[in-house]
């Protein structure tokens, strides 16, 4: 039956195998991702038994990368990128350049063409997004200065790879390959024009993401959150992440991962970003597993026998060569040794862009098939060894601190402190905004005990539904005989409800207007401000929508409205005889 439903079969079998082998790897004190990679090898075409659809698995893995990069963007603002540009930009460019030259040197030794060497070197120069983020998360370094630099470094690498993917088809014939069978956008153009077009596309995408996105996306999220539908909010979050990722790739030619990252950065400007992160996290975790499974499916173990020296050389370039380059750049820029080791270890592996570049190289006739197999083998082994490399870097840092404390304490700490201060200011702004939002919800439940039993998400939804309104002393807030279009919650000041007899004074925490709202009739009294007043107004449609999901709250309001109606009737009965006597 699985032949009829390849998508379901691929997902089901991949998850089952990954869960079992991931657990076994954990019991053997290995990272679970080793189990995920082994699951891919068992499900691939090399081993007997069930063979999963590698094409479908690759697309599902791309979903995981998109969601993961979206999650990173939610916690990584544009200000963070600007703060680390002094390290990330020169570091990423230097590492790519040197690693590519070393790859060309290996290709020359093996008798490959210059084009093969460039593709091979580029493939070994760019790290895996998934692996780096998992390494940082396991050590709680994502929000640290070193983690921010590593993520920024990776974003610059992605941007360079976007340019490389566009330029390779244009340069294929010049480098000894052949032109692509299906000419892509920009094929046949002069090279300078192709480069200019690519840069314009990436620049246009960045401009839209930075300037237009923060105005549109938070507004859209707020509008959807006001509907009160949890599933619609989650759906909108995923639609924004996947829509921007797909649209940016189709329209601007950037990668899915980069588009998703900028979608997260844009959404981080919203007060609802924490809800978006929480909603997308389970899908991020599930689909990122498929990334490792799909890598395992592509692996041909026979390359370890056919080209053992090639695999070892590639691994040395990835783990040792790239680590030395990264460490050298960071320390030469006068940043601490600890930061250099963290960045070097985190980037000492290759991943998704490497597979894309290798596949394109084979398609264009630039890279031999053995080259692609060496890249895949190096990727799997470097990913498997990356936790060991990170642990080794941490141990080396501790040794250096003990052995040469003066050098470790003094080197690069001035620049590090400056960077940390910049990141702390950005973090303080973000935390202040989140704290203000938390205070608003806390104030809501303290000022209006009516909402004390409503859960946090519903209080957040209520804040979005409220319409702020103010009134000056003597101003008529509500007029007798008007239609009941909303319910008023008094947050500061005081009002008088002018009913026959003595007016009723209402203080902060009180609410009014609910009787006409529930009955659908007219207002039965004037309400006048006797002080500077601030109100939250819940309009009829929003009131009905919110209370429909909280029937206990509606019942409380109805009970209070009935009590007030009875009290008003009793007041009028007491007042009428004296009016007649007069």
Image (cartoon, rainbow, N blue to C red):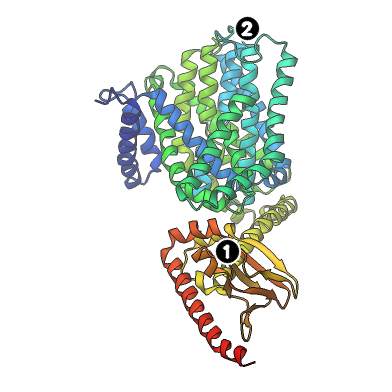
**Residue at 59%, 61% in the rendered image:** 485
Residue 196 figure quarter: top right
From what the image shows, is residue 547 above or below residue 80?
below
Q: Label 2 belongs to which residue?
A: 173
Q: Label 1 belongs to which residue?
A: 484
- Secondary element at tag 2: loop
| C-alpha distance separating marks 2 and 1 | 75 Å
**Residue at 59%, 62% in the rendered image:** 483
Residue 422: x and y, percent?
A: 72, 53
- Secondary element at tag 1: loop
Q: Is residue 95 visible?
A: yes
Query: Toward the viewer: 395 or 160?
Result: 160
From what the image shows, is residue 307 above or below residue 135?
above
Is 408 left, or right, of 22 in this rendering?
A: right
Marks 2 and 1, the one that precedes in the sequence: 2
Disc 1 crowd rating (10 Å Cα; few below 14, some 14-19, many 20+) is many
Q: How many marks?
A: 2
């Amino acid at each position: 039956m699985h032949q009829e439903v390849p998508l379901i079969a691929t997902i089901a079998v991949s998850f089952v195998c990954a869960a079992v082998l991931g657990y076994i790897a954990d019991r053997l004190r290995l990272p679970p991702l080793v189990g995920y990679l082994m699951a891919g090898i068992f499900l691939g075409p090399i081993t007997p038994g069930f063979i999963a659809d590698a094409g479908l698995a690759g697309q599902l893995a791309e979903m995981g990368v998109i969601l993961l990069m979206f999650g990173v963007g939610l916690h990584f603002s544009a200000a963070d990128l600007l703060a680390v540009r002094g390290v990330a930009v020169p570091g990423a460019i230097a590492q790519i350049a040197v690693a590519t030259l070393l790859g060309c040197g290996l290709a020359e030794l093996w008798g490959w063409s210059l084009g093969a060497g460039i593709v091979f070197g580029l493939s070994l120069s760019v790290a895996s997004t998934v692996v780096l983020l998992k390494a940082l998360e396991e050590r709680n370094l994502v929000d640290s200065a070193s983690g921010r630099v590593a993520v920024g470094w990776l974003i610059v690498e992605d941007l360079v790879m976007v340019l490389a993917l566009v330029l390779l088809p244009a340069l294929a014939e010049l480098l000894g390959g052949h032109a692509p069978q299906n000419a892509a956008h920009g094929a046949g153009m002069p090279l300078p024009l192709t480069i200019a077009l690519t840069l314009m596309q990436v620049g246009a995408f960045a401009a839209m993401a930075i300037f237009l996105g923060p105005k549109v996306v938070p507004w859209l999220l707020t509008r959807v959150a006001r509907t009160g539908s949890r599933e619609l909010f989650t759906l909108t979050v995923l639609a924004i992440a996947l829509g921007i990722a797909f649209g940016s790739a189709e329209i601007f030619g950037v990668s899915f991962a980069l588009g998703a990252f900028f979608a997260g950065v844009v959404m981080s400007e919203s007060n609802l970003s924490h809800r978006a992160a929480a909603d997308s996290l389970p899908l991020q975790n599930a689909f990122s597993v498929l990334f490792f499974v799909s890598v395992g499916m592509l692996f041909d173990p026979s390359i370890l026998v056919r080209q053992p020296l090639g695999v070892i050389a590639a691994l040395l370039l990835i783990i040792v060569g790239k680590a030395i380059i990264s460490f050298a750049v960071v320390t030469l820029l006068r940043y601490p040794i600890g930061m250099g080791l963290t960045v070097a270890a985190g980037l000492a592996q290759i991943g998704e862009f490497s597979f894309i570049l290798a596949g394109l190289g084979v398609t264009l006739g630039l890279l031999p098939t053995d080259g692609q197999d060496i890249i895949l083998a190096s990727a799997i082994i470097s990913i498997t060894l990356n936790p060991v490399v990170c642990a080794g870097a941490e141990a080396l840092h501790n040794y250096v601190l003990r052995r040469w404390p003066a050098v470790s304490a003094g080197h690069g700490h001035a620049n590090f402190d400056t960077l940390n201060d910049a990141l702390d200011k950005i973090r303080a702004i973000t935390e202040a905004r989140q704290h203000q939002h938390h205070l608003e919800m806390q104030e809501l439940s303290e000022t209006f005990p009516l909402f004390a039993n409503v859960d946090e998400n519903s209080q957040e939804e209520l804040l979005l539904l409220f319409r702020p309104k103010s009134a000056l002393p003597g101003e008529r807030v509500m007029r007798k005989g008007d239609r009941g279009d909303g319910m008023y919650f008094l947050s500061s000041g005081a009002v008088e409800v002018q009913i026959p007899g003595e007016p009723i004074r209402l203080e902060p925490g009180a609410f009014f207007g609910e009787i006409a709202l529930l009955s659908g009739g007219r207002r039965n009294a004037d309400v006048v401000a006797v002080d500077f007043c601030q109100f939250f107004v819940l309009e009829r449609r929003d009131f009905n929508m919110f209370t429909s999901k909280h029937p206990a709250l509606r019942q409380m309001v109805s009970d209070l409205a009935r009590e007030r109606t009875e009290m008003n009737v009793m007041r009028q009965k007491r007042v009428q005889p004296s009016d007649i006597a007069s």
